[in-house]
Image (cartoon, grey):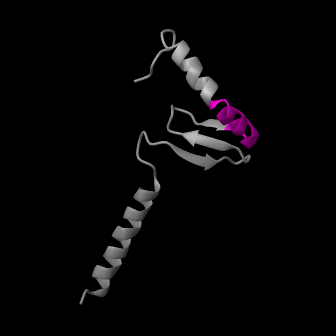
Amino acid sequence: MPTEEELRLEIERLKAENESLKKPARGQMFLKVSEKGALSVYGLGRFPVTLYREQWEKLLGMGESIRQFIQENDHLLKKKE
């Protein structure tokens, strides 16, 4: 049977592990609602991409056009590694 001290240490270890799991891995994209109620995408670059709901819906509706534009202009577009 573990002692009270061992249980306390295990709880502290699990709390620390839980906190680290809440944070997204470096380079991993994640979503967040901003203070002003907009949707922010983190992990694409140094700063988040933040748009309001209607803006995201318009942009997502253009998905096929954006893909086609990228394909047609591939020779002009730079790629970030």
From which residue to which does the magenta span run?
Answer: 51-63
Using residue 26 as the reference point, say whether residue 53 is left or right of it. right
| Quarter of the picture holding the C terminus | top left
> Considering depth in this image, is 32 or 73 the residue closer to the camera?
73
Q: Is residue 52 magenta?
A: yes
Q: Residue furthest bottom?
A: 1
Q: Main structural element of the magenta stretch: helix, strand or loop? A: helix
> Considering depth in this image, is 47 or 71 the residue closer to the camera?
71
Q: Residue sitting at 61 percent across and 28 percent down?
A: 64
Q: Residue furthest top?
A: 76
What x and y, as percent, mark residue 16?
39, 64
What x and y, as percent, mark residue 21?
41, 58
What x and y, as percent, mark residue 33?
65, 49
Q: Residue sitting at 49 percent across and 42 percent down?
A: 29
Query: What is the count of numbered marks?
Result: 0
> Considering depth in this image, is 60 or 35 the residue closer to the camera?
60
Compared with 33, 11 (above or below) is: below
| Quarter of the picture holding the N terminus | bottom left
What x and y, as percent, mark residue 22?
46, 57
Q: Is residue 47 magenta?
A: no
Quadrant in which residue 7 is drawn:
bottom left
Compared with 75, 25 (above or below) is: below
Q: Residue sitting at 62 percent across and 42 percent down?
A: 40
Q: Residue sitting at 41 percent across and 57 percent down?
A: 20
Compared with 27, 32 (above or below) is: below
Compared with 20, 28 (above or below) is: above
